[in-house]
Image (spheres, rainbow, N blue to C red):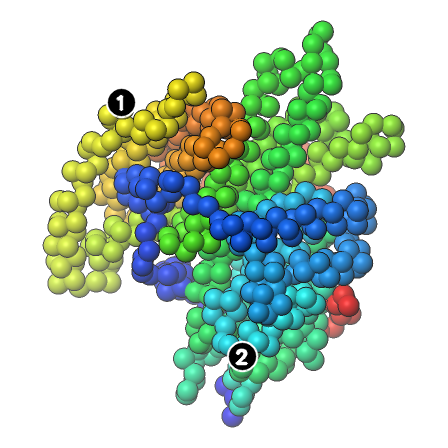
Amino acid sequence: MSAPPLKKPVVTEREARQVAEAAREQAWRKPSFAKELFLGRFRLDLIHPHPLPTDEAVRRGEQFLTKLRAFCETKVDGALIEREARIPDEVISGLKELGALGMKIDPKYGGLGLTQVYYNKALALVGSASPAIGVLLSAHQSIGVPQPLKLFGTPEQKEKFLPRCARTDISAFLLTEPDVGSDPARLATSAVPDGDDYILDGVKLWTTNGVVADLLVVMARVPRSEGHKGGITAFVVESDSPGVTVENRNAFMGLRGIENGVTRFHQVRVPAANRIGPEGAGLKIALTTLNTGRLSLPASCVAAGKWCLKIAREWSAAREQWGKPVAHHEAVGQKISFIAATTFALEAVLDLSSQMADEDRNDIRIEGALAKLFASEMGWKIADELVQIRGGRGFETADSLRARGERAVPAEQILRDLRINRIFEGSTEIMHLLIAREAVDAHLTVAGDLIDPDKSLSDKAKAGANAGVFYAKWLPKLVAGPGQLPRTYGDFHPAGHPDLAAHLRYVERNARKLARSTFYAMSRWQGRMETKQGFLGRIVDIGAELFAMSAAVVRAELLRTTTDHGREAYQLADTFCRQSRIRVEELFGRLWTNTDDVDHKVVKGVLGGAYAWLEQGVIDPSGEGPWIADATPGESEKENVHRPIR
């Protein structure tokens, strides 16, 4: 007898937090540069000398990039994909033949075995030709079937699915539901055990690649029953299984060629052999997969930054106003400087994080999250500045520019395409909370029981003793450090180059200041700390800036010693660090001087209707319908728009 289907979970805020906490990786088995940074310890030795790929990795990676570039230049029409909102089947077939579906898959399963560094370079290259193609390849390999199987799959699962993923089959990752986003505790899709199978029921929303996918990674809740631990669990599902229906192909303001849909499961039979990991491990698998999977988003932002820099340079030299090129007017020149310096930093963050992932010597869960957060925010600003530099032409579509005889520059498209990066694979707000949780992990480990209302007095006493020992050693180290000595990091100030050593000293000093600020806030708010999301967001943003400064400086030194662009790299790193320091000072100021309290009062007023009069005088063009679509399990009543590409 199979267990009854699950009802939609009703959970409290505390229960939701407990689910999220249980899913995160608890232990720190390897060093982490970013974790140490948030604790006030600047471990330059973890990132310098800059790690480098092996000669074999470079050979294999460059060989594929050459083929991929030739394919993109001759077979990919980005304007056509934007216009028709679809990647042509022959383009996808060509990518399969090229091996692009298997960039990260081990050669023994038919893949190319590229490193994370070269995988990201490939995504940046193909994404510059068409962002929709970059998303298709990324969703398939970064979070689709290949990555969770690589990390958690059995040998039998790898043998069965990875060769297909490497050459022919497109995969997708299905977690989000119409009423469930970043709060997985309320996940409603069920997987009920039935003999050697599970019976899958539910609806998944925003299934990137779901419209064309052959294989799906599906997160579903297994009910607890005799012999079954239950909990949110990951499954590989064949998309052509009876009962799987793609009910809608969604359309968006950007990334118009992506195959994103709504997928319904009705009594879908999934073999237990297709379960990834044990029951209840689904969220941990998802989060672990995202540790490196998130690095695909910074790759797209780096590509965008490089293209924006190229267009800004060419246009600003050609366009004249008041007797000289607009680039020579300070207001425009500042924007160009920001684009150039920030693009340099974004690539530094991406390459450093990716190489650290390849070497696997460090735990990069915070670095990967910071890279995603920082790149998605700064990439959007870069695109916005390019539109401003282009003026009216930045707002005009490429097709319109072409029609009237000018160069078809899709500046407005890149602005639309990049906007989603601040939302998916963890919105900026969720990333702030996720990173903040990791950043204060050491504090919660030693003193968490002190602020936990469920802990006994004896537990609190024990925690108090442990905390006393930890803070007696830790706090004195936050008073002074190498950043206060004028000659520290002298290797980063070679003759004839800007002084990057000063920026490293700044990072060291402000890492300690950041740790002191965090400790003071925990002492002040204790159990209420988790509600201070504005404060936590600023703490994380400061950490992101310090990480980016460190990466930029280390990359500049690498380029100085290995290329002919050392002087220029030093100048870009110096400029970025100067710009970043201004943002850091502002963020530190806003830790304690802000409008968080009055904002909260206004929000209560808005939701209570106190300001409804302010909404008068406009017409709401929204259509009729519920805010959230009904996702009641059951047989589909819609046409199946699934279209596998063979």
Query: Viewer-proximal residue, 19 or 559?
Result: 559
Q: Where's residue 540, x and y in %?
A: 39, 41
Q: Secondary structure at mark 1?
A: loop
Whether residue 261 can be seen here = no
Q: Amino acid at mark 2?
A: Glu
Q: Earlier in the sequence, mark 1 or mark 2?
A: 2
Whether residue 226 can be seen here = yes
Left or right of residue 459, residue 347 in this image: right
Which residue lies at the image location 68% right of the left edge and 38% below the top edge?
A: 414
Query: Could you classify mark 2 by the number of other residues whose Cα lies within 10 Å: few (under 14), some (14-19), or many (20 or more)?
Result: few
Per the image, the residue denoted by label 2 is 156
Which residue lies at the image location 66% right of the left edge and 24% below the top edge?
A: 313
Q: Amino acid at mark 1?
A: Pro
Query: Viewer-proximal residue, 331 or 148?
Result: 148
Q: Residue furthest bottom?
A: 1
Distance from disc 1 to disc 2, alpha carbons, whole Å, reads 58 Å
Q: Where's residue 380, x and y in %?
A: 59, 37
Q: Residue furthest top?
A: 323
In the image, is residue 383 above or below residue 353? above
Q: Where's residue 86, x and y in %?
A: 77, 53
In the image, is residue 197 above or below residue 466? below
- Residue 504 tag number: none
Per the image, the residue denoted by label 1 is 486
Name which quarter of the figure residue 27 lies in: bottom left
Which residue lies at the image location 68% right of the left edge and 20% below the top edge?
A: 316
Q: Secondary structure at mark 2?
A: helix
Left or right of residue 444, residue 270 in this image: right
Query: Could you classify mark 1 by the number of other residues whose Cα lies within 10 Å: few (under 14), some (14-19), or many (20 or more)?
Result: few
Left or right of residue 212, residue 374 in this image: left
Q: Where's residue 449, x and y in %?
A: 22, 58
